[in-house]
Image: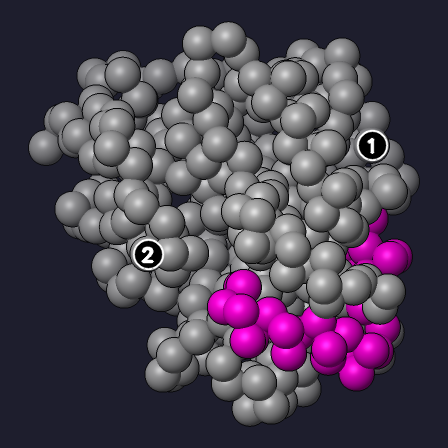
């Protein structure tokens, strides 16, 4: 198969930042994607409905004139979040999910949740009105090894929370382990998982073998090969509980290439090429549309996109810029370390 037409894809986990960075990188997503769930971890974070509304306007103002793109806004859950404001944002159609960052888990997460008990009134309200919770599923306890943080989160936070609030819809974002995949598969309802492009392609060797490679460092950190294979199996299975959330997370190069580099892989530019390659490799091109265009809207209760995109496989590798130059500095594009032949027409 050399051509594939699918419904236009959506990205169910995306970092767009703000200001000059937003202007520079938004076209990389809006070129191929119809909608995206926008992460709220700005500085300061997007906490209230009013914050989300203002951020949405800044995103729309940064959109290239020819692109149609709908940002799906989220609120950053803090211990001070007001359940009434969350409900108001949801009922107005603005807010599509609330994001739980355990405090300290990742970039700009210091305003996140330290004590889950303090946000129970918000979570109870969300369960009542049907608003999904997106979770960064890692514990931050210093004693827990960074490669175990997802598995420990499932056992000590996610599972008890799901038992306590079975009506709460939870998206386990950027699943990186076989444990996560198995946990989602075993759930009877109200649990789904997003999977990034890069976690389908790299394992932890990419970060550490032959020198430290900061552009492969992200959180949750890539795990060993058996986990990558479990993620590939889940993504290409067609199981409606798994869908694309790229977690494309731009940082200007100097913030990555330094003594204490930021976490994030920037995959917006070549994500569709990378995914077509992965799905073809697994003999599962027929499941690509479910992963990028159908399962996500079904989970979030939104219509699928009417527009389509066509992917074609070229005889020669397609090239992408090595970096996107933004007003906030250059951002290195994810290098899958193999040539890409698929492109979006
Ligand atoms: O790698 C990551 N980068 N993981 C996250 O959870 C946050 C993100 C960012 O904002 O840079
Ligand atoms: Zn993220």
| Range of magenta residues | 104-132
The quarter of the picture where the N terminus appears is top left
**Disc 2: which residue:** 298
**Disc 1: which residue:** 255
Percent x, y of residue 125: 63, 73
Image marks 2 and 1: residues in contact by CB distance under 8 Å: no
Q: Residue at x 43, y 21 (%)?
A: 68
Q: Is residue 202 above or below residue 256?
A: below
Q: Is residue 102 above or below residue 141?
A: above
Q: CA distance from mark 2 to mark 1?
A: 37 Å
The tag earlier along the polypeptide, 2 or 1, is 1
Q: Is residue 272 left or right of residue 307?
A: right
Residue 81 belongs to the span the image colors magenta:
no
Residue 337 seen anywhere in this rendered image of the structure: no
The quarter of the picture where the C terminus appears is top left
Percent x, y of residue 202: 50, 48
Q: Quadrant of residue 288?
A: top left
Q: Residue at x 88, y 57 (%)?
A: 110
Percent x, y of residue 233: 31, 62
Q: Residue at x 53, y 69 (%)?
A: 129
Q: Residue furthest top?
A: 65
Q: Is residue 155 above or below residue 214?
A: below
Q: Residue at x 84, y 68 (%)?
A: 79
Crowdedness near tag 1: few (<14), some (14–19) or many (≥20) residues, C-alpha within 10 Å:
some
Crowdedness near tag 2: few (<14), some (14–19) or many (≥20) residues, C-alpha within 10 Å:
few
Label 2: state its secondary structure.
Answer: helix
Residue 50 seen anywhere in this rendered image of the structure: yes
Label 1: state its secondary structure.
Answer: helix
Front position in the image: 28 or 71: 71
Residue 128 belongs to the span the image colors magenta:
yes
Q: Is residue 313 above or below residue 97?
A: above
């Amino acid at each position: 198969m050399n051509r594939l037409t699918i419904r236009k894809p959506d990205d169910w986990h995306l970092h767009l930042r703000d200001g000059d960075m937003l202007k520079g990188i938004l076209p990389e997503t809006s070129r191929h994607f119809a909608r995206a769930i926008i992460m709220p971890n700005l500085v300061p974070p997007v906490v209230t409905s009013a914050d989300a509304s203002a951020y949405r306007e800044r995103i729309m103002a940064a959109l290239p004139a020819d692109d149609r793109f709908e940002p799906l806004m989220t609120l950053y859950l803090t211990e001070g979040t007001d359940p009434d404001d969350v409900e108001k944002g949801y009922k107005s159609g603005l807010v599509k999910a609330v994001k739980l960052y355990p405090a300290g888990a990742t970039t700009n997460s210091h305003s996140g949740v330290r004590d889950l008990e303090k946000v129970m009134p918000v979570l109870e309200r969300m369960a009542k009105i049907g608003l999904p919770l997106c979770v960064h599923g890692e514990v931050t306890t210093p004693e827990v090894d960074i490669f175990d943080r997802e598995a420990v989160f499932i056992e000590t936070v996610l599972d008890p929370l799901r038992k306590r609030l079975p009506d709460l819809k939870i998206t386990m974002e950027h699943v990186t382990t076989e444990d996560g995949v198995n946990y989602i598969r075993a759930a009877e309802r109200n649990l789904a998982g997003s999977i990034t492009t890069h976690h389908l392609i790299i394992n932890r060797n990419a970060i550490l073998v032959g020198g430290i490679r900061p552009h492969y460092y992200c959180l949750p950190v890539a795990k060993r090969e058996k986990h990558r294979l479990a993620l590939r199996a889940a993504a290409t299975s067609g199981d409606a509980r798994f869908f694309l959330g790229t977690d494309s997370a731009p940082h200007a190069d100097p913030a990555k290439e330094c003594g204490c580099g930021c976490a994030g892989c920037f995959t917006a530019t070549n994500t569709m090429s990378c995914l077509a390659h992965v799905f073809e490799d697994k003999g599962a091109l027929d499941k690509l549309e479910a992963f990028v265009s159908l399962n996500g809207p079904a989970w979030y209760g939104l219509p699928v996109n009417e527009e389509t995109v066509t992917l074609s496989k070229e005889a020669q590798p397609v090239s992408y810029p090595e970096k996107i130059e933004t007003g906030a500095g250059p951002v290195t594009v994810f290098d899958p370390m193999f040539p890409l032949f698929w492109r979006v027409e």
